[in-house]
């Protein structure tokens, strides 16, 4: 598979969507775990690792999309929405503030939206692109 032919925006959309699905699947993990063992509120390490793996993939996609975008507004919102997503995921790991999951889903959804928007309307095709 040639990774050079894959758009960073497509990778960003996939990572954001995988993040949303991962977050939605978490309650199912706890229900399954409760059925097979004693009830525990501890999240398995591998499940937390997936959070950070998707966040790192998402960061790489954002940085590459920002580099290739022709819109300064889209660049700002890609970084802004990724920052919020990172904050919500890290906060969830350390439980500093109680923030409803809908904010995490929203940040991932907004990030995905801006990757799609950037892919359709703001992508430079070559180095001669006029970036404003």
Image (cartoon, rainbow, N blue to C red):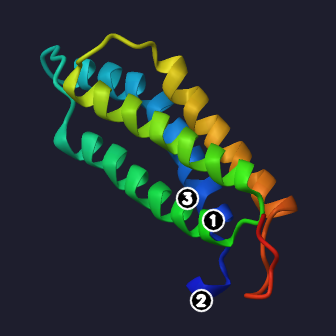
The outermost residue toward the right is: 121
Please state the horizontal and vertical placement of residue 93, each as a whole percent of the image: 24, 30
Q: How many marks?
A: 3
The quadrant in which the N terminus is found is: bottom right
Label 3 environment density (alpha carbons within 10 Å; few <14, some 14–19, many ≥20): many
- Mark 2–mark 1 Cα distance, whole angstroms, equals 18 Å
**Mark 3 to mark 2 CA distance (whole Å):** 20 Å
* Side of 120 where 8 appears, left or right: left
Q: Residue at x 60, y 27 (%)?
A: 106
Q: Is residue 72 above or below residue 60?
A: above
Q: Are marks 2 and 1 in contact (CB under 8 Å)?
A: no
Q: Which mark is residue 27?
A: none
For image coordinates 79% across by 87% down, the residue present is 128
Residue 115 against residue 85 in the figure, above or below: below
Q: Which residue is mark 2?
A: 2
Residue 111 x %, y %: 62, 43
**Residue at label 3?**
62
- Dot 2: element: loop
Q: Which residue is mark 1?
A: 65
Would you identify the image quadrant in which residue 92 lies? top left
**Cβ atoms at labels 1 and 3 below 8 Å apart:** yes
Of the two numbered discs 2 and 1 in the rendering, the one whose residue sits closer to the viewer: 1
Locate residue 60, reporting x and y percent. Answer: 47, 64
Instruction: Compare residues 52 and 82 and report the one nearer the observer.
Output: 82
Q: Quadrant of residue 35?
A: top left
């Amino acid at each position: 598979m040639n990774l050079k032919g894959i758009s960073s925006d497509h990778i960003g959309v996939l990572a954001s969507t995988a993040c949303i699905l991962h977050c939605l699947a978490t309650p199912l993990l706890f229900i399954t775990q409760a059925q097979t063992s004693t009830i525990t509120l501890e999240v398995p390490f591998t499940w937390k690792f997936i959070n950070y793996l998707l966040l790192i993939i998402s960061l790489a996609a954002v940085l590459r999309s920002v580099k290739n975008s022709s819109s300064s507004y889209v660049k700002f919102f890609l970084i802004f929405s990724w920052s919020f997503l990172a904050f919500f995921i890290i906060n969830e790991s350390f439980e500093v503030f109680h923030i409803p999951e809908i904010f995490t889903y929203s940040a991932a959804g907004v990030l995905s939206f801006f990757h799609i928007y950037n892919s359709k309307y703001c992508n430079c095709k070559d180095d001669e692109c006029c970036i404003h």
